[in-house]
Amino acid sequence: MSFTDYLEESSQDTNRYKELLKNHDWDYSQSSDNRAYKKGKASWEEIIRLGQLVDKNRKIFDKMKPKKLSNGEVVPQLPQPSRDGKSIKADAENEKKRTSREQKTRKSVDDEFLQLMKRTKE
């Protein structure tokens, strides 16, 4: 690969990264629609992957992310880049565990709400 090809590919990755940040559903983890959740999660994973390549100092991310989510929570930060690439895999695993816990909690809260609604109707 020539240096010119490298620069062109890097520029395409940077543009793709900016486009992902611009169009990302920052509230995807709050969604009750599974399709929206999966789309947002896939987008977030791609943002992490490209961020490790083109935005190691996180200047683009910090500039383009919203200040807060719609529910007032702080926007999650990108994981720290690593030289060996192991943290990317570990972060993906931690994200899977976290989202699994969130889904279980959401289901538990939904179940409690439904039970409460049944009791109030009786």
Image: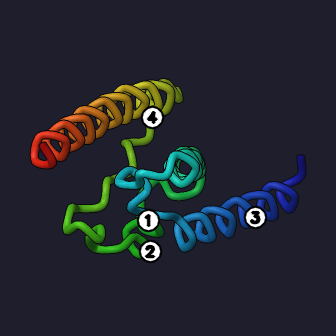
Report the residue marked by disc 1.
61
Q: Position of residue 46 (x, y in %)?
A: 59, 48
Front one among 8 and 103? 103
Report the residue marked by disc 4.
82
**56 sits to left or right of 70:** right
Q: Are marks 3 and 1 in contact (CB under 8 Å)?
A: no
Report the residue marked by disc 2.
64
**110 sits to left or right of 55:** left
Mark 1 is on which residue type?
Answer: Phe
Real-space Cα separation, disc 3 to disc 1, in angstroms:
16 Å
- Mark 4, other Cα within 10 Å: few <14 / some 14–19 / many ≥20: few
Residue drawn at (89%, 52%) of the image: 2
Q: Are marks 4 and 1 in contact (CB under 8 Å)?
A: no
Real-space Cα separation, disc 2 to disc 3, in angstroms:
17 Å
Report the residue marked by disc 3.
12
Q: Quadrant of residue 10?
A: bottom right
